[in-house]
Image (cartoon, helix red, strand yellow):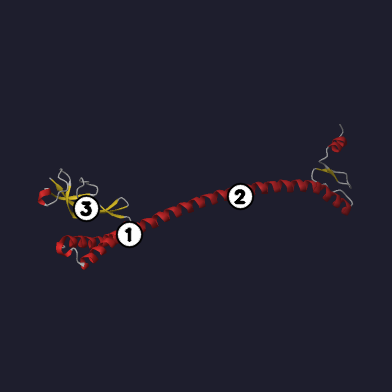
Amino acid sequence: MTEDNKIKNNQSLYQCKECGLHYKDKDIAEKCETWCKENKTCNIEITRHAEENKSSDKLNLEECQKNCGEYLNNWKRERADFLNYKKDEAERIGFLGQYVKEDIIFKILPILDNIALAEKQLPAAALGAEWTKGFLQIQKQIDDFLKKEGIEEIKSVGEKFNPETMEAVGEAESSDIGTTEGGDEGTIVEEIQRGYKMNDKVLRPAKVKISK
């Protein structure tokens, strides 16, 4: 098969109508035809320059794709770092908030101790008085506030001694303190100072006496 027949059978080639050269690219064929008309000759260099430009464009495209991949990976790393930073910052703020709350509670505890002590000292005749009711209502309001903040009183009297939430300050017989609670060895028979915990974390252990 001659070269002319090969060209005729290849529908993807474009021919310059002036010089007869064939090109794979239609735009190049049209440029060649324009050049030939304007200069009355065939500019073979058009083909060479066109091929060089195509190679250059391919290299530029590959470089662009490479840069895009690097930029995307950098963006992903930066985003991951930013999300980790936000998480760490939220935990730090939460920790500071918890610390501030605990600090406030520790300042309130002595007030609660004094109220509890005053309640123990109330004479039986005063329990029905209006001022006593007001006093006990203040205590209830403080207890309700603590519960809303997640603060709970550690139950002690009548319970088995728990070294994680209690501090033993002495031993006593149930009959010695006039209580019917407990009786078994290791049972709490008297609470000297209330203990508190917040979200299962012990703020202050309960100071107690244990039955002998």
Q: Which residue is at a point 23% across and 61% down the rendered structure image?
A: 112
The Cα–Cα distance between marks 3 and 1, rounded to whole angstroms, is: 20 Å
Looking at the picture, how far across and down is residue 153, in whole percent?
26, 54
Residue extending furthest toward the left? 176
Disc 2: CA contacts within 10 A as few (<14), some (14-19) or many (>=20): few
Camera-nearest residue between 21 and 119: 119
Q: Is residue 147 visible?
A: yes
Mark 2 or mark 1, which has the lower sequence index?
2
Disc 3: CA contacts within 10 A as few (<14), some (14-19) or many (>=20): many
Q: Which residue is at a point 51% across and 50% down the rendered structure image?
A: 77
Residue extending furthest toward the front? 128
Looking at the picture, how far across and down is residue 172, in whole percent?
12, 49
Q: Secondary structure at mark 3?
A: strand
Q: Are marks 3 and 1 in contact (CB under 8 Å)?
A: no
Residue extending furthest toward the bottom? 131
Q: Could you tell me the amino acid type at mark 2?
A: Cys
Residue designated by label 3 = 206
Q: Which residue is at a point 87% across and 50% down the rendered structure image?
A: 36
Q: Secondary structure at mark 1?
A: helix
Residue designated by label 2 = 68
Looking at the picture, how far across and down is residue 131, in whole percent?
21, 68
